[in-house]
Amino acid sequence: MRSRVEGRRDVVVVGGGPAGMAAAARAAEMGLDVLLVDEGRRLGGILPQCIHPGFGVHYLGEELTGPEFAQRLASRVEDAGVDLLLDAHVPEVRWISHAEKGVRVLSPGFSGEVRTGAVIYAAGARERHRFEIGILGDRVAGVYTAGEAQTMMDVYGILPGRRVLVVGSGDVGMIVARRFALEGAEVVGVVEIMPYPGGLTRNVVQCLEDFDIPLLLSHRVVAVRGRGRGRVERAVLVRVDEGLRDVPGTETEVECDTVVVSAGLVPRMEVLRELGALIDQATGGPMVNDRLETTVPGVFAAGNALVINDLVDHAAEQGEQAAEGAAEFLRRGGIPATDWVKLRPGEGVKLTVPQLLSGERDVWVYLRVARPVRNARLSLRGAGKEVRLPVVRPAEMVRVKLMAGEVRRAKVGGREVVAEVYGG
Amino acid sequence: MKDRREVRRLTCIVCPLGCEIEVLLDRGPGGDVRVLEVEGAACPRGREWAAREVTDPKRVVITVVPVRGGDPPTVSVKTDRPIPKSRIPEFMRALAGLEVEAPVRVGQVLASGVLDLANVVATRESRSMGRSLGERP
């Protein structure tokens, strides 16, 4: 593939995962001059290591594995004529003017600054590690994040251990547990601090029950033990109460040689924070308007760098939205300042995206609930909208379309829309 | 006649709803299973899934296969059709010795008719690294 780097661009996309690829392809298809920069040696982000099926049902209308989904988007990127710069790190995006940004790039082939009209930041997320969830004890080999273990197994073909304990029952945790069991490792258990599984029911059935892997709810791992500079030998578990506090006297030890930590993701925000973008404490990502533009004009965000998604389909969709936002920004010389309506989480809701609504356009609202609710009533108070859902769970992002007219209703009221979820 | 009826409880995986389904089944003398009743499913797809799940559960199997001289050194693969759940361990053992040569394209069949159950198809590409270090021209 060509890779012209020099010269000013209409759009620079940072990150070549699903959101970045969809953004770059869409922007180029609209006739813009696009450079896509990625840290890896190939496009795809985390998709190539997610070899299980279940990707693309909404976005592509068929069920694919992660690598296949990545391949589809990568060919679209190529067909659209996007210029690629791989093996390249972006340490900084510099504000030059309202209409001009500088993207600093470090790579073996090119290091310097690329000038651009708009930036789409889709650099994804990082994994939380053992110390962030309070797993103390010895510093021994054999403790991996789920992504590291998945890369070892499914990219390099190396089984990380023989007796594996998985910490965290989100979808990723359950999927890696199944992979190791299928490859002949003994998965001694999946430990979950909450009283319910973190991931989808279908994964509890297909990953854990299919392979007789025990799920230990309301427990947490407090330490790993091993000798000297050796390998993990044991993990120390404790039961927790309803307040997630350790119950004294419930410590048990489990023999294992590997501990895999699947404790969620954190959006990578260093570059946007340095640039001065406001960060939403609830999502950990930037605050954005309904074009997915951050509070820095001309800088957009999508995918897990915007909000942690559970479906790749949503990440790719956000990439396309950000590309459309960037195109509008370039066409109109900026997203016009407007009388924004604030969208925020209320009762039973953990987070909402986007945070600012114009009322000039229909908008997809993404939200995550705080706890599972059956026969849920989702209210978007201020917009006068109510939706009934048979079930909502923290593991599954809820996506609702809010009409421009509904948003405008809030302009005569409190100037905000509050997302709330109630049972029954 | 001896009572051969039993109730199986399942969590439906057809959609995110996750209905708790009860299947009343009758076990024949030859081990064959007949579904008598399905309760608790909110939709016909769930009823169908539950009946199949107790009579003949199947899964698509996914794993990786080493690629000699490939970058990356493996390709991910899937079976081109679901295979009986009970035969997954046997199927994995049959694949354990499989190794292929780079390059590998997405969609390439790497093993056909494994145990007469399914073909194994690459879902990721692996390019040729060229000669590896230490190898003579």
Image: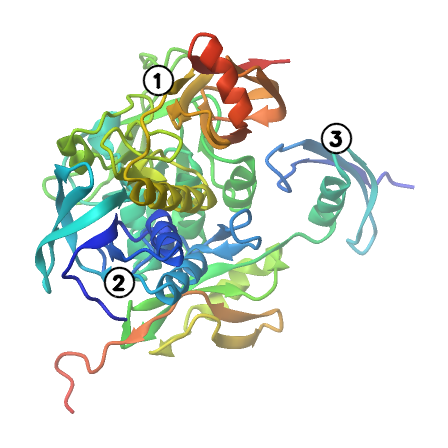
- Foreground pick, A176 / A379: A379
Label 2: which secondary element: strand
| Depicted A33 relative to depicted A207: above or below | below
* Residue at the extreme left: A112
Q: Give the number of the mark in front: 3 or 1.
A: 3
Question: Do circles 2 and 3 both sit on a common chain?
Answer: no
Element on which disc 1 rests: loop
Marking on residue A405: none
Where residue A277 appears, as percent x and y from the top left, is 21, 29
Residue pictured at 30% horizontal, 49% vertical: A149
Q: Residue pushed farthest front?
A: A332
Which callout, 2 or 3, points to the residue nearer the camera?
2
Q: Answer left or right for B90 relative to A47.
A: right
Q: Position of residue A95 (x, y in %)?
A: 13, 37
- Contact between marks 2 and 3 (CB within 8 A): the answer is no
Quadrant containing the N terminus of chain A is bottom left
> Image height check: is B93 above or below A103?
below
SS class, disc 3: loop
Identify the chain of the residue marked 3, using the numbered disc in the image.
B
- Image quadrant holding the C terminus of chain A, namely top right
Residue A314 rendering spot, x and y as whole percentages: 45, 41
Residue A250 badge:
1
The residues bearing labels 2 and 3 have C-alpha atoms spaced at a distance of 53 Å
Q: Amino acid at mark 1?
A: Thr
**What is the chain identity of the residue bearing mark 1?**
A
What residue does disc 3 label?
A: B40
The single residue placed furthest to the top in the displayed view is A414
Query: Mark 3–mark 1 contact, CB under 8 Å?
Result: no
Report the Cα–Cα distance between label 3 and label 1.
37 Å
Q: Which residue is mark 2?
A: A83
Looking at the rendered structure, whether the residues under marks 3 and 1 are on a common chain is answered as: no
